[in-house]
Image (cartoon, helix red, strand yellow):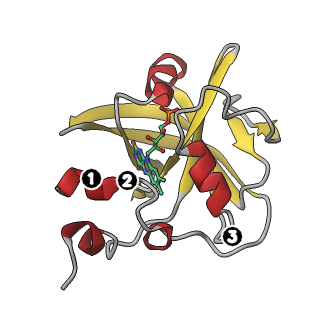
Amino acid sequence: MKTLPELLKQISHGVYVISVCDGELSNAFTAAWVMQVSFSPLLLAFSISPMHRTYKLLGRSGECAINVLKQDQTALALHFSSSNLNKMTDHEWQFAKTKSPILSESSAYFDCKVKQTITTGDHVLVVCEVIDAGYLEQGKPMLYCETGDMDGSSQFFK
Ligand SMILES: Cc1cc2nc3c(=O)[nH]c(=O)nc-3n(C[C@H](O)[C@H](O)[C@H](O)COP(=O)(O)O)c2cc1C
């Protein structure tokens, strides 16, 4: 018998680091709720809690990068899921067209401009247009179902 959090892990998601830069300030967070929502224009969407520090920066910059994590990058997923204020140091970043930070260790990135935001329950759905994309390093993408309860989601079903 599977619990509801375990059943939700049956919905396939990858694991990403979504990074934002607003002037001198930058931040990034681990995200699994990411999907393509249009071919033309090419739109991706992700769901973000408005309580996240990254959300406040995103509201100001209107730009972000969606970095794809590889299967063996559990430590990175854990690192960017923390509320630590200095998550960006000790990692190498590149800057793409929108000036969002691109995580050099990721396998691929999508450089995006925010087009629409929709409040959906306790999260905000952010729809972004892909301005640029690139492949950095080969590797199978990490799957959300492989992260166990790293996001602490089981606590929401107690
Ligand atoms: C595997 C995993 C997936 C996550 N997916 C999301 C997500 O899709 N949306 C979200 O808002 N938070 C998600 N989180 C939680 C954030 O990464 C976490 O709350 C983080 O501390 C927010 O960082 P910030 O406050 O510095 O922006 C996820 C965490 C993990 C470990």
For label 2, the SS is: loop
Q: Nearer the viewer, mark 3 or mark 2?
A: 2
Q: Amino acid at mark 1?
A: Gln
Vertical comparison of 59 with 154: above or below: above
Q: Cβ–Cβ below 8 Å for labels 1 and 2? A: yes
- Gap between marks 3 and 2, in whole Å? 20 Å
Quadrant of image for the N terminus: bottom left
* Residue at the outermost bottom position: 1
| Distance in Å between CA atoms under marks 1 and 3 | 26 Å
Q: Image quadrant of ligand 1? A: top left
Element on which disc 3 rests: loop
Q: Is residue 124 above or below residue 130?
A: above
Q: Residue at x 50, y 16 (%)?
A: 60
Query: Is 106 placed left or right of 69 in the picture?
Result: right
Q: Toward which corner of the image does residue 25 lie, by quadrant?
A: top right
**Disc marking residue 155:** 1
The amino acid pointed to by label 3 is: Asp
Residue at the location (25% across, 74% down)?
7
The numbered disc on residue 152 is 2
Tell me: is circle 2 under 8 Å from ligand 1: yes
Q: Are marks 1 and 3 in contact (CB under 8 Å)?
A: no
Amino acid type at circle 2 is Gly
